[in-house]
Amino acid sequence: MDTTINIRTNKEIRNKARKVFSSLGISTSAGVNMFLHQVVQERGLPFTPTVDAKKIREKWDRGVSKTIDTYKKGKQKGFANAKDLHGWIDGK
């Protein structure tokens, strides 16, 4: 059963997020749902809140490097389109 969540957020942040989601071929709703799925999977925030830009960059670089290595080994799942990604997220 689906439900609706109403949240308050800064209009500029919402618009920037919409652009990012759109560039990924997904709706804002799908992006928020992905975030919520990650919260459940991680049993917490799927990121470590910090204001230290250097730590953020180092973590990002490690993640990108790991993803590239995994992809090169043929273990990374790829998706042809957003519909396939959503199906994978939903376990279909």
Image (spheres, rainbow, N blue to C red):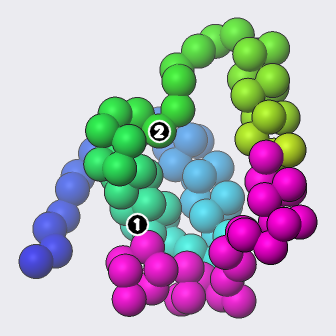
Q: Position of residue 48 (x, y in %)?
A: 53, 24
**In the image: residue 15, left or right of residue 73:** left
Quick one: label 1 or label 2, which is nearer the N terminus?
1
Instruction: Tell me: residue 27, above or below residue 61.
Output: below
- The kind of residue tagged 2 is Pro
Q: Position of residue 10 (x, y in %)?
A: 47, 36
**Quadrant hosting residue 57:** top right
Q: Is residue 57 magenta?
A: no
Where is residue 52 shown, x and y percent of the image? 70, 10
Instruction: Count all numbered tags in the image, as a single digit.
Output: 2
Residue at 51% across, 72% down: 27
27 or 52, nearer to the observer: 52
Quadrant where the N terminus sits is bottom left
- Residue 29, labelled with which disc? 1
Residue farthest to the left? 1
Residue 26 at x, y percent in the picture: 56, 74
- Left or right side of 43 for 17: right
Would you name the residue on which mark 2 appears?
46
Please report the bounds of the magenta region as a residue range. 66-92
Under mark 1, the amino acid is Ser
Residue at position x 58%, y 42% in the image? 12
Side of 69 relative to 2 (left or right): right
* Quadrant in the picture for residue 83: bottom right
Does residue 86 show up magenta in the picture? yes
